[in-house]
């Protein structure tokens, strides 16, 4: 028997609370050619033919039975009675037959209480996941050479924060197709597909909403809609959608869907796509079990699990030996239907983070194959499981910066002549990239051999050139603010390499740092010309927050976070400090002015902190020599708040500490313990 029994049930890997989905039987249920056949039950099957010629021959004879052809895979989707099924099964032109399953939206939902917030009224937010995968540290100016295909519930074309060729901010192409009766690709009656698209490509710098991993509007997107308002589609529709992605020249396919059981037809279809050079990502599953979800668990597909803002595994994320990478998937803020925004959770939300990282970095290395890219993502991932692959986190968190560095180190180097040296400059800027510049000049005549200026913030730059070995040159890097590229406003660094040997590197170099290839090298210049106070670093509409943290012997237990009200959005956080007791760590962050914030510091050991901390905001002291000797946490409210927490001095855990009281703007914030 060649008939493969069993139905595969797939679903989008997040759900919708309070959504009632109709379940009409879309598609033909019978294609009668005789009165007797009208009375017989028919079912929908996927038929795998031995070759294209056999498929065309058989389907032409049974045109009334045929629903769909997927020609590249020699597949026919047919409505068959039991007798017709048996007849097809014994044909030498048929390899095997599988019953076609349905793809469903899930019944369970993981959704934030803040899901309906109007993000746009608060200008532009950077969701924590964008920072976690270090998307902003890799330049996205080359992404027009990539095409990313999203298979989902559609796309909210006309959303002011999503790419659209008609928008001035968007210069990439957005195209699409629909499968069967799902509806137009450029509309979305569900919202799920629009949320996924926003994580991948929401436009940045437009002073509204959110920004995506690729934020310049130049990524080529192809949308294939398989889910209609009825909430389900056929498994064969997923394969047809995949074929659509192939035909339009996609490099990356992102599928925030999954579930059900193994299918030979699907496995072969996804392997065919991978063999054609496509990198495929799918959500690992939301059951929180060790079961396998498909298509994520096919060998040709990268299975993506979910972590939260503290890089802890999400409780719902699948755990098995097919999980390959993880991404941010808890309380993810992104675009929604109707020009709105929503915060939801699921491996569906983690998947677009990871697929977009692949497209972003791949754009810098277009000659790398999909297999090489997959291997690089495994090798460069931030390990979250003790340095080895494990069933919870796979190889770890996909990060754009680490992937870029890995591929940069492994790409084919420039070949210099025997009498030349290969000189390489690598630079990561801090937030204020325009302050940094560098040059490489010949010593004899001052000719500039290479240089960089007018740089963007938090970006990676690399330059390589061949210089005659006999030529003396001087490399100089300058910072007009005289604070280098680290560490108050980012974690930048630079390095200069000659013939593979690193001859100069640094980060906190003050005003300038210089290397002379033929003489005494000048050290870092940390001296400032005068005692003039440094100008403010924050932009208009921002206020500076500074935390000074004195470490104790157990500072690895200490963590802190800043939440923006009213939705407790995490805007900054850090944990696991290293150093010796007495060391002082200073963090300065520019926060949006005229907003209310909560600073929360925690101790995972429940024994408080032996060190201390101080907070200033907008040049005013908010908290001085703060400490707590026992208990897990302490919170401080600051900024433009209309309320604060009441401190119950007589109780560390009494109900009074959770009460709110109103107060006028400008009243100093009150400290609250153990919130």
Image: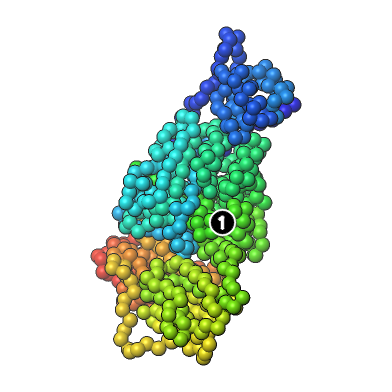
Q: Is residue 441 above or below residue 146?
A: below
Q: Position of residue 618 (x, y in %)?
A: 31, 73
**Numbered circles on residues, count:** 1
Vertical position of residue 411 compared to residue 172: above or below: below
Left or right of 64, for residue 476: left
| Quarter of the image that includes the N terminus | top right
Q: Position of residue 474 (x, y in %)?
A: 47, 83
- Tell which of 552 and 314 is nearer to you: 314
Q: Residues within 10 Å of mark 1 (few under 14, many from 20)?
A: few
Please name the residue shown 72% across and 28% down the image: 2
Query: Which residue is pictured at 46% across the width and 76% down the height?
Result: 449
103 to the left or right of 601: right
The percent position of residue 292, horizontal first and vertical second, equals 64, 44
Name the quadrant containing residue 291. Answer: top right
Q: Residue furthest right?
A: 1
Compare residues 254 and 672 and report the one nearer the observer: 254
Q: Quadrant of residue 408?
A: bottom right
Give whichever of 445, 622 is nearer the camera: 445
Is residue 61 or residue 539 the one in the foreground?
A: 61
Residue 393 can be seen, yes or no: no
Q: Where's residue 364, x and y in %?
A: 51, 60
The C terminus: image quadrant: bottom left
Q: Which residue is mark 1?
A: 367
> What residue is rendered at 66% in x and 26% in y?
54
């Amino acid at each position: 028997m060649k008939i493969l029994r069993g139905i595969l049930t797939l679903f989008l890997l997040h759900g919708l609370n309070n959504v009632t989905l109709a379940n009409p039987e879309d598609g033909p249920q019978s294609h009668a050619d005789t009165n007797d056949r009208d009375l017989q039950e028919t079912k929908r099957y996927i038929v795998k033919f031995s070759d294209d010629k056999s498929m065309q021959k058989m389907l032409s004879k049974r045109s009334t039975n045929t629903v769909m052809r997927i020609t590249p895979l020699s597949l026919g989707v047919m409505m068959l009675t039991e007798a017709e099924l048996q007849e097809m099964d014994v044909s030498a032109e048929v390899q095997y037959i599988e019953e076609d399953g349905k793809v469903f939206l899930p019944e369970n939902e993981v959704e934030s209480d803040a899901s309906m917030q109007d993000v746009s009224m608060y200008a532009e937010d950077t969701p924590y996941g964008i920072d976690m995968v270090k998307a902003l540290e890799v330049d996205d100016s080359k992404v027009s050479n990539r095409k990313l295909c999203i298979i989902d519930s559609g796309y909210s074309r006309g959303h002011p924060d999503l790419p659209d060729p008609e928008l001035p901010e968007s210069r990439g192409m957005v195209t699409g197709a629909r499968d069967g009766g799902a509806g137009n690709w450029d509309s979305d009656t569900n919202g799920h597909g629009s949320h996924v698209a926003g994580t991948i490509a929401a436009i940045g710098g437009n002073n509204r909403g959110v920004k995506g991993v690729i934020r310049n509007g130049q990524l080529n997107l192809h949308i294939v809609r398989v889910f209609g308002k009825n909430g389900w589609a056929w498994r064969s529709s997923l394969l047809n959608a995949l074929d659509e992605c192939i035909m339009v020249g996609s490099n990356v396919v992102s599928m925030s869907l999954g579930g059900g059981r193994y299918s030979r037809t699907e496995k072969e279809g996804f392997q065919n796509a991978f063999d054609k050079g496509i990198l495929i990502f799918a959500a690992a599953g939301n059951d929180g079990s060790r079961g396998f979800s498909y298509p994520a668990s096919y060998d040709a597909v990268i299975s993506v699990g979910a972590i939260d803002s503290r890089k802890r595994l999400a409780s719902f994320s699948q755990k098995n030996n097919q999980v390959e990478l993880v991404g941010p998937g808890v309380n993810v803020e992104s675009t929604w239907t109707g020009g709105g925004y929503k915060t939801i959770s699921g491996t569906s939300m983690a998947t677009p983070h990871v697929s977009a990282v692949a497209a972003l970095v791949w754009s810098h290395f277009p000659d790398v194959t999909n297999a090489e890219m997959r291997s690089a993502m495994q090798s460069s991932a931030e390990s979250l499981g003790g340095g080895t692959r494990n069933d919870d986190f796979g190889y770890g968190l996909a990060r754009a910066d680490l992937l870029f560095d890995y591929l940069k180190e492994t790409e084919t180097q420039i070949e210099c002549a025997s009498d030349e040296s290969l000189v390489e400059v690598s630079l990561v800027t801090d937030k204020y990239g325009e302050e940094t510049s560098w040059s490489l000049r010949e010593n004899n005549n001052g000719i500039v051999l290479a240089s960089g200026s007018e740089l963007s913030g938090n970006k990676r730059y690399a330059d390589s050139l061949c210089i005659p070995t006999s030529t003396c040159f001087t490399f100089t890097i300058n910072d007009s603010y005289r604070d280098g590229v680290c560490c108050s406003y980012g974690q930048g660094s630079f390095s200069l390499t000659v013939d593979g040997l690193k001859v100069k590197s640094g980060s906190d170099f003050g005003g300038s740092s210089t290397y002379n290839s033929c003489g005494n090298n000048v050290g870092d210049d940390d001296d400032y010309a005068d005692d003039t106070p440094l100008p403010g670093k924050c932009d208009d509409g921002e206020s500076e927050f500074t935390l000074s943290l004195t470490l104790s012997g157990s500072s690895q237990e200490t963590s802190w976070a800043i939440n923006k009200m009213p939705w407790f959005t995490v805007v900054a956080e850090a944990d696991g400090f290293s150093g010796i007791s007495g060391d002082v760590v200073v963090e300065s962050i520019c926060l949006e002015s005229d907003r209310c914030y909560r600073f929360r510091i925690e101790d995972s050991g429940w024994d408080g902190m032996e060190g201390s901390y101080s907070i200033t905001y907008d040049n005013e002291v908010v908290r001085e020599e703060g400490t707590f000797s026992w208990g897990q946490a302490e919170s401080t409210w600051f900024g433009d708040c209309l309320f604060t927490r009441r401190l119950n001095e007589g109780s560390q855990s009494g109900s009074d500490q959770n009460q709110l009281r109103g107060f006028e703007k400008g009243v100093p914030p009150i400290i609250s313990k153990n919130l």
